[in-house]
Image (cartoon, grey):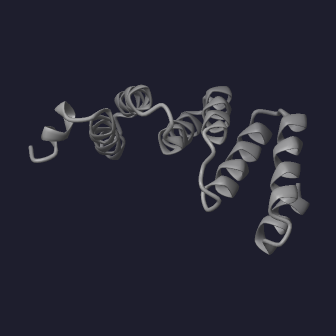
Amino acid sequence: MRWQRLEGESRTSAGNYLILQGLLAERREFYDLALALYRQAGEKMPKNDGVWRLVGDLETRAGRLTEASDAFEQALKLKPSPVDRPEILRKLARVRERNLDQDGALSAWRQLADEYPDVIHLIEEVSAF
């Protein structure tokens, strides 16, 4: 496979190869394998917030909401880009809501409103809570 050469290269390349394998596994509905691959990628690239977003999304899909919340929190700790940060906060708030953690959800929604007061669609979503 042409991508397999990445496995033996730098930690970042190996991590990207694991993410690629995880995406393929997820596409084929091998969710446990995908999750394991994403977690391995997180070990190779501990400062990559995107890995933890993938873990959070997959844990959410599986209904493991506490684990999803933890993954989104980990992604936020890694200082995601200003483009990605509001989406991660939004996902965190929604997961906490689904997990009946109203205080945690409110905290995430407030943080989102405080950090992005001029983004109308985010404020509308926050106000719906």
- Image coordinates of residue 119 in percent, x first then y, are 78, 71
Quadrant that contains the N terminus = top left
* Residue 54: percent from left, percent from top: 49, 42
Q: Could you say which is closer to the camera, residue 80 or residue 61?
A: 80
In the picture as drawn, the residue positioned furthest to the left comes out as 1
Give the residue at the far front of this rendering: 10
Q: Judge from the rendering whether residue 58 lies leftward or rightward of residue 4; answer left or right.
A: right
| x 65%, y 56%: residue | 87
Q: In which quarter of the image is residue 3?
A: top left
The quarter of the picture where residue 19 lies is top left
Q: Residue, x 35% and y 30% (percent of image)?
A: 37
Q: Position of residue 47 (x, y in %)?
A: 51, 36
Q: Is residue 106 left or right of residue 20?
A: right
Q: Which of 56 and 47 is in front in this view?
A: 47
Name the residue nearer the viewer: 59 or 19: 19
The foreground one among 38 and 58 is 38
Quadrant holding the C terminus? bottom right
Q: Which residue is drawn at 53% across and 37% down?
A: 52
- Tell me where residue 104 appears, x and y as whole percent: 84, 36
Up the image or down, 54 lies above or below 74; here it is below
Q: Count the marks: how many? A: 0
